[in-house]
Amino acid sequence: MKLSDLQFELPEWCIAQEATEPRDAARMLVQVLGDSDHTHRKVSDLPDCLRKGDLLVFNDTKVLPARVWARRESGARIEVLFLEPAGKEAQWQCMVRPAKKPRTGECLEGPGGLELCMVERVLDGDGNPGAYWIVQLSDPNRPDSPVADLLDEGGEMPLPPYIHRPPGSDASNHERDDRDRYQTVYCKHRGAVAAPTAGLHFTEQLLERLKSRGVQSAFVTLHVGLGTFLPIQVEDLSEHRMHEERFEVPASVVQAVEDCRKRGGRVVAVGTTSARALEAASVGGKLEPRTGRTDLFIQPGYSFVSVDGLLTNFHLPGSTLLLLVSALVGRDRLMELYSSAIQSDYRFYSYGDAMLLLPGDGMRN
C-alpha cells in the first residue's frame, strides 16, 4: 500500500469546529465487518449495538493544557507545546514555533509569571536542529510546583490546527469550554497533548446505560502524542518512522479481556489509541501487562491479537490512524464508508462524529 491509497477529498464544511452537545448526540456509522451494508445511528444508541458480555476498553489519559504562549525580551511571541518529560526535573521536550528564534540558555516570559528556559535544541534523525527543544518550566514564586500543575494554570488546551475559531469570537469562553469538552469524562492520568477523540462522545449517563446492559469496561492509558495526527510524509509506507507514545496496560485489563473471551464477548476498543495500547501489549501473540513506550505501526496486513471491534472518529487523509482502521475493515471498504459519511454530512476529526466497526458472527467472538 502507498500513501496515495490513503488520500481522499474532504469538503471544508465537513471538519467539525465545535463539539456536539450533548456528547452522545453525535452520529455513528455502524459497519459489521464482512457485511456489504452499513447503518446510521447515534452514539447514544451504542447500548443497542453491543451485547451483554462485550468489553469496551477506554483510554483514560488526560489532556494537558500543553500550549504556552511566551515572549522574548524583544516582545516577540513564541509558541511552546509541552510534549513529555525529558528526564530531568521540570525539563520537558517541547515543540517550539518558531524554533530558530530562541537561543540556548535564553529565558522566556510566560503567562502568570511562568519562566521558560531554553535548555537545548533537539537534533532530528539526520543530526540537524529540528523543531523540538528541551525546555525547563518554572514559577519563581513556587519553585517546587510540578510542570503539569503549572500547565494547568498557565497553558491552553492544544486543539488541532484544523479547528479555527472565527474572528471576534470570545477566546476566553472558548478556552473554558474546550478545557471541559476536549477531555473525556473518565480521564485520569495527565500526560496527553491530544484527546483520545472517540472517548469524547461518552457521558456518565451513557456509561451507566452500558453497564446496565451488561457491557463491561476496562481502562488502559496511552498518552497521545503530537505525532498521532501528523500526516505520513513518505509515499512508500515501509519507510515511515512511527512515533513513540507512552502506554500502560495493567493486569486488570488483561484479566478483563480473558474473562470476556471466556464468556463469548467481543473486545471493542474505544479509539485507535486504546487499540494501539492493547496491541502493543500483545506483541508476541498474547496480551500481557505492560508499561513502556510503543512505536507499533498498524497497517493493512496486520493481524489483531486483542481487538475485535473499534469505535473511532473519522480521521485525516494520509494518517497513521486511517491506516490502523483500514487494517481492521480493509482499505477499499473504508474508503467506501468515508465516501458515504461525506455524502451523508457526517462531521470529521476531533470534534466530529463516530464510526463503529463490529465483528461479524463468523468472526472471533
Image (tube, helix red, strand yellow):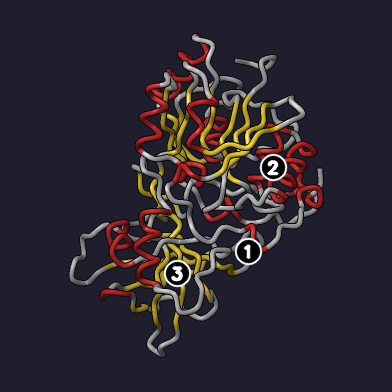
Q: What x and y, as percent, mark residue 209?
A: 39, 28
Q: Is residue 203 above or below residue 86?
A: above
Say which quadrant the N terminus sits in: top right
Indicate the amino acid at tag 1.
Gly
Residue linked to disc 2: 323
Indicate the amino acid at tag 2.
Leu
Residue linked to disc 3: 80
**Disc number placed over residue 127 in the picture, else none:** 1
Q: Quadrant of residue 360?
A: top right
Count every numbered label the image shows and give the total: 3
- For label 2, the crowd category at 10 Å Cα-Cα, with few meaning under 14, some 14 to 19 and many 20 or more, is many
Indicate the amino acid at tag 3.
Val
- Give the SS element for disc 1: loop
Q: What x and y, as percent, mark residue 51?
A: 51, 19
- For label 3, the crowd category at 10 Å Cα-Cα, with few meaning under 14, some 14 to 19 and many 20 or more, is many
- Give the SS element for disc 2: helix
Q: CA distance from mark 2 to mark 3?
A: 29 Å
Q: Residue at 38%, 47% (x, y): give it.
A: 62
Of badges 2 and 3, nearer the viewer stands 2
Q: Residue at 63%, 49% (x, y): give it.
A: 346
Of badges 1 and 2, nearer the viewer stands 2
Q: Residue at 56%, 51% (x, y): give it.
A: 352
Q: State which tag comes first along the sequence, 2 or 3.
A: 3
* Left or right placement of residue 129 versus residue 104 in this view: right
Residues under numbered marks 2 and 3 in contact, where contact means CB atoms less than 8 Å apart: no
Q: What x and y, as percent, mark residue 192?
A: 44, 50
Q: Nearer the viewer, residue 300 or 331?
A: 331
Of badges 1 and 3, nearer the viewer stands 3
